[in-house]
Amino acid sequence: QAIASRAFCITRRALVHDMQIENSRASGTPGLGDFVPNFRVERQRAMLITIDGDPQFQNLADTNWRQVINTPFLVLQAQDGSFVVRLGDGHWMGSMQLAQGYSSVAVPPAAVIAAIGTAPKPPAGVTAAAPAPGAMPPALPAVIVVTEPTVLIAMNGEPLLAEVAPGVQWVANARAVLLRTAGPVAWWTLASGRWFSAPTLDGAWTRVAPAN
């Protein structure tokens, strides 16, 4: 009740990702169940790219590049075996490892872009926000690729705690709902409509029973 009137912000991407965690386990499983996804805590801007199991590839014409098709994200494998992902409309990052180690790379060859096709156009009236004059472009997030259901808890640095009720603090610089209680000392987060808790921010995370 103490936090019921508190407004929390969550990005559309984070919300869709939370829904995908449950969808990947929903077949043949009644209700939400006791399944606990993996948790990844990052003290930096981060983007989680989810793949539904081991990558499944589709050749991109005769370019010697391949596209991972069991993901809602654009993930490519170059002819040298490296992985390349697209962030937004124009930022490309690559790594020799699928899971991590991504840094900025050049745009793939024109033939690869042509084989991919064009990205869907945004709805009418929706445009990208123009940067303020003289503003520095934001740093690109760390890219994390996972093949199992995973919850990403990303913060801009160490947690900035703000009290929202006696004994309850809210992490103001986290992308998702993240709380800390004083008694008992624990961390709490909401994912896929369920609460999870951990004795420390880095885990181990367990599901909280509805009765609690």
Image: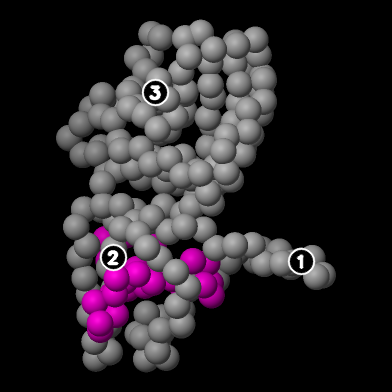
Which quarter of the rendering shows the C terminus?
top left
Image-quadrant location for residue 117 = bottom left
Q: Are marks 1 and 3 in contact (CB under 8 Å)?
A: no
In this orientation, does residue 138 appear? Answer: yes
Dot placed on the residue nearer the N-terminal end, 2 or 1: 2
Task: Read off the residue under disc 1.
Answer: 135
Residue drawn at the location 29% of the way across and 63% of the way down: 98
Segment colored magenta? 69-96
Q: For residue 4, say whether it is visible.
A: no
Place of residue 85 in the rendered image (x, y in percent of width and height, measured from the top left): 40, 69
Point out the residue furthest to the right here: 133
Q: Name the residue under label 2.
A: 97
Badge 3 amino acid: Ala
**Looking at the picture, does residue 68 appear above or below residue 161?**
below
137 horizontally vs 150: left or right = right
Please tell me which residue lies in front, 4 or 109: 109
State the residue lying farthest toward the front.
Answer: 158
Q: Is mark 2 on a helix, strand or loop?
A: loop
**Figure quadrant of residue 63:** bottom left
Residue drawn at point x = 47 percent, y = 9 percent: 184
Report which residue position mark 3 lands on.
198
In 3D space, how far apart are the residues under numbered discs 2 and 3 (Cα atoms)?
Answer: 30 Å
Judge whether residue 136 is colored magenta.
Answer: no
In the rendered image of this protein, does residue 212 appear above or below residue 193? above
Q: In which quarter of the image is residue 64?
A: bottom left
Q: How crowded is mark 1: few (under 14 residues within 10 Å), some or many (20 or more)?
A: few
Distance (Cα) linking label 1 and label 3: 39 Å
